[in-house]
Amino acid sequence: MYAYCVIEYPVKTLDKMFTYKIPDNLKATLKVGMKVLVPFNNRLVHGIVLKITNDYNEEYQLKEISKIEDEFLVLNKELLELGNYLKEMTLCNLITAYQTMLPSALKIKNQESDYNKYEAYVTLNKEKEEILEFIAKHKGKKVDILNQLLKTNKIKRSDLDSNSVRELVKSDLVKIEKVKVYRLNTQEIKGEDKELNKEQQQVYEEILKSLNHQEIFLLHGITGSGKTIIYIKLILEVLRQNKTALLLVPEISLTEQIINIFYSYFGKQVAILHSGLSKTEKYDEYVKILNKEVKIVIGTRSAVFAPLENLGIIIIDEEHSDTYKQDTTPRYQARDIAQKRCEYYNIPLVLGSATPAIESMARAKKGVYTLLSLTKRANNSTLPQCVIVDMALELKKRNFIISEVLDKEIKKALDKKEQSILLLNRRGFSTVITCSNCGFTYKCPNCEISLIYHKTSNTLRCHYCGYTKIKDDICPTCKEKALNYLGLGTEKLEDLIKEKYPDAKTIRMDADTTATKGSHDRIIKSFRDGKYDILIGTQMISKGLDFPNCTLVGIINADTSLNIPDFRSGERTFALLSQAAGRAGRSNKEGKVIIQTFNPDNEIIKCVKENDYNKFYAYEMPIRKVLKYPPYYYLANIKVCSKDYEQASANATKVANYLRKKLDKESIVLGPSTSLNFKLKNIYRFNITIKYRFDKKIKIVLKELDEIFSTNKEVFLNIDINPLQV
C-alpha cells in the first residue's frame, strides 16, 4: 500500500504530492487526512495523507512513512476538499490551506508538546480488607484520607494533604489517576425564552423553510432589531434535527457578549474559537469539536474552518465587516468559505447586518441572495436622535475636539447617571510628532511611516512593523526643544475627557488597552455594570455591543475614514458611523448621537443622520458603476515586492505588461504605481490592479505569474483576488 502526502514546506516548488510506502505496522491504522512523519531530503518532516492506494507504477524505490503523528486528528473529506478550494481560490500552497484550518497547537509542524490539561485524582489501590486492616493499626491524616476514599471512588489530589498522599502512594495503598479536563467550561443556565415579534417571526419562518436546502439569506435589520434571538431560534431548530451550527462574529469584543447569551441557552453544547484564547484553550475547544461533544461553534474569521460535521446552518453576523477578509496568505473571505460549506451540506447561509456590504445588497437585489428585513427595534424603542455638528464653526469658538453640543449632552448624561460612548477611529496619544523649528518628523526606519506617540509608555511606535523607541524631548536634528504633538488619538482624548469631566469615571477600549488576555471582556463587563460613565474607543466599540444605560454616542472626527484614498471609504464610513450610532438608546431610555464633522453637507453623513441605508445604497451604486468597481466589476490586486527598489520597479512593469498581453481586452490593468504604504518592514511594494467582468483567463494568468515568480529569490508577488482595498 502507498500513501500520497503533502509535506510541511510552504514553498511553491514543493506544492505537490509525494509518494511513500506504508509499512505493515501502519496499514491497519493509517487513514486519509492523518498527520504523519515522513523522510524527506535526509530528514524527517511532517505531512498530511491525501490519498491511499495499492497501485504504484514508478520504477525507483520508495521511502516508508516513519510514523503516524496524530491518530486523533483526521481532516475529514469535506475539509480536505475545502483545502483544495482554498488553494484554487487564493492561489496559496495546499499545505498552507490545511495549516490555516488548524489551531496553532495542531499545526502540521508542531505536536512535540502534550497540550491536554489533566486533573490528578487519588483512588484506592488495594482491596477493602487491606485498607480496613491498615486503618485499624494507624491514625492521623492518612487514615482520614482512606476513610474518605472508602465512601467515594476518587478525590482531587489538590484537596488532600500532599505529604500524606505521597506516603500512601509509597505504601501502594492509593494511586494517582490523571483525568483530562477542559480549560473552558460553562454552567447550564436556562436562557429567557423570548417571544419573537411579528417581523422577527416572518424572518424566522422564511429561513426555517430552507433548513434542508442551500439558500443564501441577507438579513438586513436595523441596530437593535433583535437579529440574535432569530439566530438562537434557528439554531434550536437545527439542534432538534440533530445537526450542528456555526456562528461567526467579526470582533473578539463581540464574542464574549454573544457567547454569554448562547451559553445561557445551550450551555456545554457551545465551543468558541477566536484569537483571544490561549494556544491550549484553542486546542481544548478544537478537541471538543472533533470529539462531537459540542453542536455549536461561535468564533471569529478562522472559526469558519471548524471541523463540525452534519452542519445544519451557518450564520455570519455583521457580515459587512472587513475582519472577515484575511490580509495575509491565504487571503480568503470567510463568506466564500461559508458558502462553499453550505453547498457541501445543502444548507442555508444567513448573512446579518444593519449595514450590509454593497456587493451583498446588490446580489440580494438581483435575486442571488434572498433579502429579509427588520425595520423596527425589537423592544419597540425609538431610534436615537442624530445631530450633526459643523466643526468649522466650532473652531471659531475655540472648541477643537469637543463641540459645545457634545459637551452639553455629556454633562446632561452624567447628571442623569446615564452612560456615554465616544468613538474615535484612531489609537495612540498623537498622530505625529514634528519639530516646529526644523520640520523634522519621527518616522519608522523600516516602513517610512510616521511613528505614533503613546503617552502611557512614553514611546513612539510603528503600527505596521512594531518598531518602538523612547521619545526624546529634544529634536534629534536641530537639538531644539520644539517638538509639537499633531493630531488626536484615543489616549490623548482620554486625557482631555478626564480633565474636562473630573468627576466622571472614564475607561478606554482600543488595541492598546485590550492587548492582554480577557481585557475585552473586562472592559465591556465593567462598563455594562455601570462602573464607568464614559467609554472611549476605536471602531471595536461600534459593532453589536449592547449597553442598556448608554444614551449618548459622540463621534469625534467623523470625516477621518472619508478621506482615505480608497473606493470603499464611503461605505466604511457609513457602516462605522451607523453601527456606532446604534449603541445609543437600546433600552427604554431615549438615545442621542452627536456626529462632529467638517463636512456637514456630505451625502454619506446625511444618510447616517437619517439612518437610511437604502438612500446610501442608491447614492453609492452609480459612483461604483462609473468608476468600474464592485459590484459591477471584480477586482484582483498584485503587489510586486522586493528589498531592492530597482528590482521591484522593473519587475512591476514586466508584470503589468504581461497582464495586458495575456488578459482579454475588456479587462482593465491599472499600474504599476507605488502602494499606499510604499515601504513596509524594509520591503518596497508596487501595486497593479485588475478590473474584470467575465474574463475566464484571469485565474490561469495569475497562476502563471505566480509560478514564474515562485523561484525568484529577489522579488515576490502578493496576489489578492477580490481585495478589500487597492
Image (spheres, helix red, strand yellow):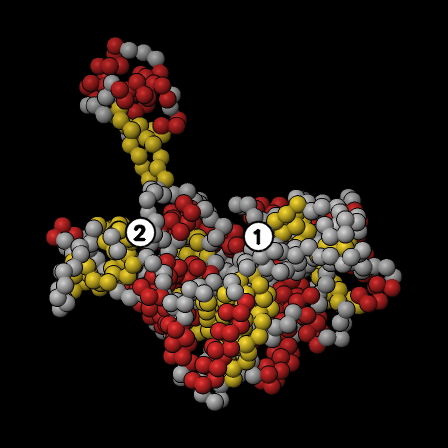
* Residue at far right of view: 397
Q: Position of residue 465 (x, y in %)?
A: 56, 55
- As helix, strand or loop, the secondary structure at mark 1 comes to loop
Residue identified by numbered label 2: 291
Q: Amino acid at mark 2?
A: Asn
Residue 487, quarter of the rendered image: bottom right
Indicate left or right for 213 with 253 as reference: left
* Closer to us: 549 or 508: 508
Sequence-earlier tag: 2 or 1: 2
* Residue at far top of view: 137
Where 717 sits versus 309, above or below?
below
Q: Position of residue 72 (x, y in %)?
A: 27, 50
Q: What residue is rendered at 77% in x and 44% in y? A: 503
How crowded pointer 1 is (Cα within 10 Å; few <14, some 14-19, many 20+) is rated as few
Q: What residue is rendered at 33% in x and 42% in y? A: 114
Q: What residue is rendered at 49% in x and 50% in y? A: 276
Number of marks drawn:
2
Label placed on residue 466: 1
Calculate the distance from the C-alpha at mark 2 to the C-alpha at mark 1: 39 Å
- As helix, strand or loop, the secondary structure at mark 2 comes to loop
Where 342 sits versus 6, above or below?
below
Indicate left or right for 142 with 363 as reference: left
Indicate left or right for 472 with 646 as reference: right
Q: Amino acid at mark 1?
A: Gly
